[in-house]
Image (spheres, grey):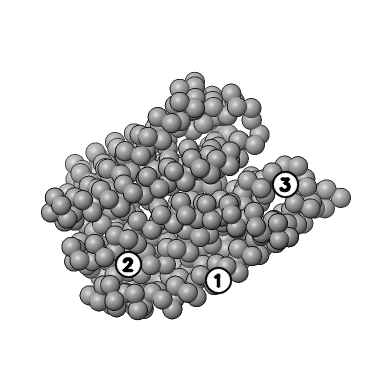
Amino acid sequence: MFQSIGKLSLTTLAYGIANAISAGAPLLLIPVYTRFMNPEEFGTVSIFNTIVILLSSVIGFGTSAAVQKKFFDLEQNQLRTYSSTAIQMIAAISLAFVFLVGILSLTKDTLFGIQMPWLYLAVLAATSAAIQQILLAIWQSQQNVKAYVKFQITYSAALLGTPTLLMIAAKLGMIGALTGTAIAYIFFGVVAAIVLDKMGHIRQKASQNYLLHIVRFGYPLFPQLTAGWAIAMLDRFFIQKSWGLAAVGAYSLAFQLAQPLNVFSASVTQALTPSIYSALARKDSAARHSNKTQILLAMILTLALALLITLAAPPLIRAVAPAYEHSIPFIPWLTAALMFNGFYRLATIQMLFHEKTRQIAQVIFGVALVSTAANFLIIPVFGPIAAGWVSCASFFTIFLLTSQNARNINKAVEHNAN
């Protein structure tokens, strides 16, 4: 047990450092943003980032998860063809969104407070993020922690440095923040594409059979990915509509301060996924028991981190950004929401291995519909705090339903093994 915990700790620490630096860039930018931008401008940047994240889920279409799953099933030449097919599919979806933005630009000057030309950059940034995820999925499956960490650190430095340079040195303010963020996404998307090309994962001829598998794998997973982000981030659009961009800025600051929970849970999930997939593929009951212990430990640590953030964030806001003190009431709700999201991620690992993406999608999509309706109805009445209530309740419900499905699958697997 202690040996497995030690292995989890070392691997999680490596992924955690890389992901913490990547996700920590927005946190480190908070003092810069709150000093050089007012809440309304901060809200505009937050909406732009939200659009990029949502689009990356749509454009990515679950391809990184599909590539990671097939890494353990295919020979290297087959895997290269599979990943090439996935990347070409990403390019096709991206072009469709560029065309859609062009159509919208004929009738609209802004969308959710964002000028239409910025949406072209948002599509390119989202496409770059999707390509990066495929490269990271391959490195993660190879357990190539060194390459993963190196890429994430340099990428994070760009996410932090480029907006700061353009905001302060070039004195571009909000425009500098938006431009710098887009440049970082796109540049490292190009870097990821070059690395994948050198590994032979881009120029292979697309396979119709693999394309159909990606669609079958990603189609039920697609609602999970998009609906999950919708639950976490769609509320900003409702807040913007009813309460303005300044309210979005306050809410987004609280969400950013809760982000270490997402970083930690993502790191633990990444660390556990290869060993759990390997144990399931080998039908190793001893290793599966060890993995259960690791998952329980990860949940306990996630809870501890949630409590720490809830206690530490309010004084941090008062010290660093007193003008944003109205962000404080959101923190307990958003911290709890991201804690439950972390629990949910751990529950999905085994379901993804068995390709039970449809069950995951049904839960996420159903909760997303209820969440969207609730945000639409109660945010205008009760204010932005209602978004925190809805997020917390939504992720708690997702965790309960998904963990029950995971237990049922585990019982079925064990019954078939006996």
Residue 260 versus residue 22 in the image, above or below: below
Is label 2 in a helix, a strand or a loop? helix
Sort mark 3 into few (<14), some (14-19) or many (20+) by Cα contacts within 10 Å. Answer: some
The image quadrant of residue 37 is bottom left
Mark earlier in primary sequence (3, 2)? 2
Between the residue at mark 1 and the residue at mark 2, the CA separation in whole angstroms equals 21 Å
Residue at the farthest left position: 171
Give the image location of residue 332, x and y in percent: 43, 76
Where residue 253 is drawn, which disc sits there? Answer: 2
| Placement of the N terminus among the 4 image quadrants | bottom right
Of residue 333 and residue 137, the one placed in the foreground of this image is 137
Q: Is residue 86 above or below residue 163?
A: above
Q: Residues within 10 Å of mark 1 (few under 14, many from 20)?
A: some
- Inspect the image, locate mark 2, and give the three-letter code of the amino acid beneath it: Leu
* Residue linked to disc 3: 279
Q: Left or right: where does residue 183 sit relative to residue 287? A: left
Left or right of 142 on screen, residue 55: left
Q: Hey, which quadrant is residue 253 in on the image?
A: bottom left
Q: Which mark is residue 303?
A: 1
Mark identifier at residue 322: none
Which residue is at a point 23% across and 66% down the rendered structure image? 34
